[in-house]
Each structure stands twice: as structure tokens, then as C-alpha cells.
Image: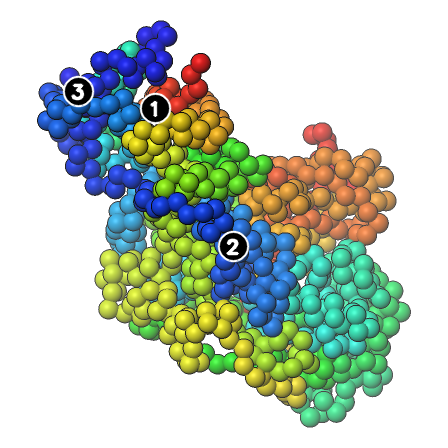
Amino acid sequence: MWHLGRGASFVNDTFQPPPHARLMNQSTSTNLAEIYRFLAQSMRYPSPDWMQADYFSALNTFLVELGWDGEAQTIRRAISEGADWLEPLQVEHTRLFVNAVPCVVAPPYGSVYLSADGMLYGPSAEKAKAFYREQGFDLAGEADIPDHLTFELEFLALLAEEGKDQEEELFLQNHFRPWFPHFQARVLQKGRHPFYGVLVNLIDFFTREEM
Amino acid sequence: MALNLTRRKFLQTASLAAATAAMSGCFANRATASTPFVKKPFTAPGSFADTTTAVGGVCEMCFWRCQLVGKVRDGKLVKLEGNPKSIDNGVSICARGNGGVKLLYDPDRLKFPMKNVGKRGAPEWKRISWDEALDECATKLKAVIDKYGPHGIAIFPHGSSAKYPMTFFEHVIGTPNNSEASFFQCRGIRDMAYVATLDTAPDENVDMANAKVIFLLGTHLGENIHVSHVKRYLKGLENGAKLVVVDPRFSASAAKAHTWVKIKPGTDTAFLLAMMNHLIKTGKYNKAYVEANGAGFDKFKAGISHATLDWAAKICDIPARQIKEVAELLAANAPNVSIHPGRHVSWYGNDFQRQRSLACLTGLLGAIGVKGGFVKGKGPKVGKSGWPKVNVEHAEAHALHLMAKKHQFSPPGTPTDMIRETAVSGKPYAIKGYVGWGQNPIQTIPDQALTIKMLQQMDFVMVCDVMPTDITMYADILLPESSYLERYDMIKTGTQWDLSGKQEQYITARMPLVSPTAADHERKDSVWIVNELAKRMGYGQHIPVQSELEMTNKILAGANLSVEQLVKEGGIHVQPGVDPYGAVLKVNFFSQEVADAGFPGVPTYIPVPEPPKGFARLVYGRAPVHTFNRSMNNAWLMNEMPENPVWLNDESAKKMGLKDGDRIELVNQDGVKSETSSVVKVTPGIRKDTIYMAHGYGTKNPAMTVGVGKGIDDQSLITAKAVDPETGAHGMRNNFVKFVKNGKVLSIPA
Ligand code: SF4
């Protein structure tokens, strides 16, 4: 059951996976690619374009299947009970990742955490871009900041899709893990809405080093 | 969460299929593109690592507008340099110019339009779309116009990209309430005083490179850096020019001076009058020039005859002998002397008269149109582009200073103080819409509490900026503008920096060095923003150009140039120039126009308030690595000068028990205490009645994560405001402070 609070445009009570998904014989890699994409999308600005009942339904299924029932419940409660569930998420996204007073909490760019001056597009960002290139990918926009969180997750999806397990691990190790925990810590510490706390923990779960 | 479930285990479980199946379905009809990547075969390393040079940059870290090139590596701006084709700044740029890279990649930069869903002053931002932002701005501004008239809107613009919005509001909407900080809190007084005296605004046009004497009044070149300006100054010194510096403080210029006149602040006009009186009495002025070009000289001569050396010596607290020496040094080297007009001159509220005196001194020495004198380079002509003057009559009929018959020498626009008073009192009419563009009035205008009151009573506050400066906290809708490194927005023309060099002229346009668009932000340029606003407000038919590029090309077409052609020529078009020497200007020593307006027609010294017992006068100035608040969040520049030490006379410090480096706060005559602290700089190089610090520090806006709370904000201590009667511009140096150390207030001995 998935109910959005007032202001949601529709309620999706009976989620059914689309036929192509059910028929597909998915490999682990494709599944992982799907997960990275889902995580990347989840960190984009909350907009009714994509953030609807079926999104929350998918997130809920995902969390429950993972055994993260508590988290699933927290998000369900936050989204279902708020009179207007979208605006608080938008305000929180803006405050955490765009601009805010007292300060933008957690800029979602690697080099903010990795370079001494805390600026965007530091040397580590250039290295990430070089790695994309080596793997045969380039950013669509000429001035795109390479180490934006959603780019790195989308890139991991591409690697997973191509079955490049080793490269995926290399990217995580050299480019992603050096900064993500710092970003995660800020979101966990300063977040006011449970959604992003759960999301960064999810991202961490799928990107952290496994012994 | 299930214990011990790892990613690996999860990916092997059957539940994975259920989880991801839901995922792949949920974005089926989403509008956004699914991947920000394109496939591109890998080419050998090195082929893309090459650095390219982008030409056509024009710096805006300060208003001097040096010409730049950008070193771009793979879409990233790595370095800014002077454009080798420049005949102005050449290959040199200053530290702030270099720091532009950091502005570009500052994580605190504004990225998306935002709506304040919290309160003015304590905002909670929500990112919104451009459509929503523009619709709301248009509706709210239109509502103000419908209810209160076009004059119900006030605009506070700054910088070259603000010209397009400014003229839209003035010419098309028809509001007179335009407060340009560069006029009313800076150079407007100078320009208006020189126009009244020499019939031309001076800018900083003194031929220092070829002068025999350079005379600086308060100007502190070296701490105040504009590349070609400083080049002229240094060349002059290198060529043996004598330097006279009039300043209560041993500034960087005073350190190079042959004569440092340690003047009492506020008394400069008395000093200038006494020098002129002395030269007239002893017949040492340039009689030929004055006879041929002087107007009202006899009245002037009589009007300043009371200004003896002893009279001024007492007022200015300097030896009479020194006043005489400086006067005679200037006369002995006339006409090849640079009487610098200054730039930021809104000091004490008696400034128009001082600036008139400087212009008269220039005329008295005949230092006009000659080597080393007041000489304007002859720049090239270009075309024009802009909004048609649809509703300017309305603007003129509602200009507050004209209605009140005050401040007849106001620079273009309306005196800031009148706008603010009117907004707060509602008299003679209501001002209910605020449009801010690149200006931070919280830090530029004295009496912050009143400015905030003005903002709080508005029906609507819209701000467009690059960085989240203090004013942005008061916006209802906040719009992000592309920076000067990512846009077209102005044409810059001029001549070679050394006026006596090979005569050349240049034309350049500001062009983007890197792309203004990227996936993580939606910044726009002012032409686009204002056009969209104009359409939504029903003024679409007046739009003069469709884009910033079209505007640039239109202006360049007047010189048979285009952006394309400029790029071919390395970003700057250089053509043969015209000898600038030989110009003759009429000098209104006595000004009938000024007298008719009810002000002294002969330059007159008007005393300013004295420091109360235990206080010293707070003066402020520039730091070489900062351009006020604008550079305060720049990590590179803040690293160079992280706070603004407060200068205190060494003998006073001793009596007060303060040591160099002690951490202190300041409290002013109205009991206003600085919210932040700084350190004391103990020095013999400042008068006992004067306290000095660099301006622009101590920003209150926590969104400026680098600059917030560093050093002391002088503007927060400037609560007693003075208004220059002729121009209506602010005087900002009539405030007095004491020190506070560990909570204890320390009086400053006289
Ligand atoms: S003087 Fe410095 S900050 Fe000013 S325009 Fe030139 S390089 Fe830029």
C-alpha cells in the first residue's frame, strides 16, 4: 500500500512490475545498473516529473527487500502523513545541496571534500573525468562538473551494465569512496528530513568496500 | 535492517529481482534525460589534455575591466591571464583578477532560481523553475506598478550586466528610483563636481606616467590596485616624479611619498583652499591658463582670501610650512602635475566642495591637456543598443530630489537616502517593489537597520546575483546570474595605458571564456532574464535585442566589428589612435550654477563633526586582494588576507594597554558593537584621532562559507550617516569608535 499525502496527483495502490521487467532474465550486473540509476535519480531535485507514487512504491519495495523495514516505515510516514509532502522535500534538497542559510550543507561534488580550497572542479574532478574517458564515456555538457554525485552514480551504472566489474571497483576505490563518506556524514548530521538520510545510507550500502 | 546482509549477498538473493523490477518501471514516463553521458571512443591520453586559450575575457573582479584570456583545459578554466594583445593592462592582472577562477567554481554560487518560503532576512529557499520564478516576479512587480505607479519600484543595480535591467526599469517602466552604488556611495560626487567645474567627468584621467609631481588626496594606490592605473603611477615614480600623499594614515602610497601630509580627516578642503590662496597671493599660479580659460576667477580669489596658511594649519593639524611647501612644489612643476581626482569620495558629507577644490587646483596650475596633467585618452567610437525611452517623462516627474528641490547635483538616478526615507515613510509616495541586481546595499549603504526596514516594508523583493551576498537573504525570489567569465555583456574601449606612447585605440567585448550551461545549474544572463520579465509584464514590444550576443554585435557593428572578427583578432581590436594632448578646458572657479542652487559657488570648507571624547574617527579603504564584499568568499583571496587588522596609533595603544595582534571588537558612538572581531595593528603610521581598516570584511551571510564572520564589517559601524547636500550622496566617515577587549570598553586618548 502506498499513499501519498494531500497534494499528490495520484495514488498507486497496486504496483505491478511492467511486463518487460518481469520477462527479463536479469543478470546481477543489469540489476546493479538499475540500482545505481535509481539512486542517482533519487538524488535529483524532487519534482512531480518523476517523484510520484510509483517511485515511492519502488523505493519501499527496495527497502523492504533489503530488510530495511525501519527506514521504509520512516519514509512512508514522512511522505504519507505530511499535508504537502513535496515542498518539504524540495526545501530540504535545496538546503542540503543547492544554497542555504546558514550555509549549503553538503555540496554534492567530490572535490569540495578532496581539495584543500574546497572548490568545485578540483584536480580530483579532472581525474574522474579522465577515468570516464578511458572507459569510453564523456559528459554530455562541455562545462559539466565531472564529480557530481549523480554523474558518478550514473557512470557506475554504465560500468555495471557493461559488466566491467573490475573497473567499477577501481572507480569506487579511487574516485568515489574518498569523498562520499564525508558527504554522507554531513547529510546525516545536518539533514532535517528522513528521506536523504536513508538515501545516502543506501548509496553507501551499494558502494562501500566489502571485505 | 537484516544483520550481515551485504551488497554481494543482496545481489544474489531472489528479492533483488522484485526490487529492481519496481525500479525499472517507476521512471518509465519521466521527462528528464536518463544519462548525462555520451559514448565516445577512447583516444590516446594527451589528445584532450591540451590547454586551449579562450580570448575576449574582461575582468570584473573590480570595475577596472582588465582584458583577459582564459586557459581552458578540457572544459575547465584553469587560469586567467592578461591578454597579450592588450595595450591597457597587457599580460598583467592582479591577485583578485587571478582569483576569478575561484568565483567560477565556488560551491556557494547561486545555481537555480529560488523562492523564499521562510521570512525575509531568515530565508528558507526552495528551488523553482525559471518559468515559475519569472511568472511570480512579473505578477508581483506588475501589481506594484498597478497599485502605486511605476515609481513604486526601486532598483539597486551594480556592474555592467545590471545596465540592461536598470534601463528597462528607468526607461520602459518609468521609475526614477535607481540607486547606483558606484555613484551614491562612491564616485558620483567627484563626477558631478568636475562637471560643474571643468564640464567633464574626470574618471581617473591624470597622466601620472608623464608627471613631474603626483598629488594624491586619500587615494592609496598600491593598496587600491587597478592594473593600468598602477602602471601609470609606477612609471611616473620610475621617471622621477615627486609624490605628495595627503592621508591621515601612512598608506602604501605614503610609504613611497616624498611628502606625507598627515592631515586631520575631514579637513582636506581647508588644505586645498590655503594652497590655492597662497599661490594666488604670491602670483605662482598659471596666469596664462587662468586668464585664457578661467571663469569667475575674481570672485573665487576674493572668496578664498581668508584661507591663509596658518588658518588651514590649525584646522588640518599640520605645519603651515608643509602646506606652503606642497603648494610651491606643485607650482614649480606646473603644468606637468597630476592632481588625482580620487575615486571613492563619499567621505564626510562635505565632499562636493572638496572635489570642486581639486578641479579648481587643477585649473589654477593649468594642468590640463599637457604631459602629466589632466588628460583624457581619445578612445574609439562604437555603436549603441538599449531600451527605448518609453516612459522617462513619468520618471522625471516623480524624481524625489527634483520634487523636493534638493540635491540638484545628484548623479543620474535618485539619491539612495531619499529612496530609503521615502520607502520607510511612504511620503511623498509609496515604494513597494525592490529590484536588486549585483548590488549588496547591506554592505554599501550606511545605516543597515534603516535599509532592512526599507526591505521589510516592500510588497515584493527580487534579487539577481552571482553569489549569495547579504542582500540575497531578503529576497522573495532570488535569481542566479551567469558570471562575468560565462557571458557577453559589455564593450570596453580605450587607449594605450601610457598616453605618451604610440597612439593606439582598442575595442574589446566581454565574451564567455567557458560555457555558461552545465547540468548542475540553470544560470542565465541579464538580457535573457529581463526580456522574459518584460514579455510577462506586457512590455515585450519594446525589447531591443533578443540575446546578449546580439546586443554585443549591434554595438560592435558601429565600429565595423563583430564578435567573430574580435575572436579572429585575439579578442581585442587595436587601431591607430589620436594624440590626446592639447585639449583645453574652461574652468568655473566660481560656479554660478552651484550658487543658483543655493550652495557655495566658491569652493568652501565646511567643518564636519569632531570625535566625541574617548572616540576616534573610523576611516576605511581598500585591500589589494579584495574588492569589498564581492571577493569575500573567494578562498584564494581570503587566504591572502583573512581579516582586516584595525590600525591604531602606537602611543594611544600603549596608554590603552593594547598590543599588536590583540583580538578586539569595536563599538561606535551610537553604542553599536561589531558583531565580529579582528586584530589590532599598532603603528606610528596613523593619527591618534583616526582608526583605519579595510572595507568589505565581516559579512553576516553564513551562505558565504569562506568569508562569514572574518574580520570586522566597517559598514555595520557606520550608523551616523551624512548626506552631501549638493549631490545627495552618502558621507561615511563621520562615525567614531572605541575598542572593546575581553568585554571591556577602552577609550582612545586624545
Ligand atoms: S585590476 Fe585586478 S580585479 Fe581589477 S579588473 Fe584588473 S585584474 Fe581585474
Instruction: Judge from the rendering whether residue B117 lies leftward or rightward of residue B618; answer left or right.
Output: left
The answer as to whether the residues below labels 3 and 2 share one chain is: no
Q: Is residue B18 left or right of residue B488?
A: left
Residue A5: quarter of image: top left
For marks 1 and 2, give the one nearer the viewer.
2
Question: Above or below — where is B298 with respect to B358?
Answer: below
The spot of residue A36 in percent (x, y) is 31, 28
Q: Is residue B429 visible?
A: no
**Colour scheme of the picture:** rainbow
Element at label 3: loop
- Spatial CA span between label 3 and label 2: 53 Å
The residue singled out by tag 3 in the image is: A2
Q: Which quadrant of the rendered structure holds the C terminus of chain A?
A: top left
| Residue B371 visible in rendering | yes
* Three-letter residue code for mark 3: Trp
- Percent of width and height locating residue B668: 66, 43
Rounded to the nearest angstrom, the CA distance separating label 1 from label 2 is: 38 Å
Which residue shows up at 41% across the image and 42% down it?
Answer: A133
User: Which residue is situated farthest in the top direction here?
Assistant: B3
Image quadrant holding the N terminus of chain A, namely top left
Kind of residue at disc 2: Thr
Q: Are marks 1 and 3 in contact (CB under 8 Å)?
A: no
Say which residue label 2 marks. Answer: B51
Task: Work out which residue is located at the far front of the displayed protein and give it.
Answer: B44
> Taking B280 as reference, is B67 above or below it?
above
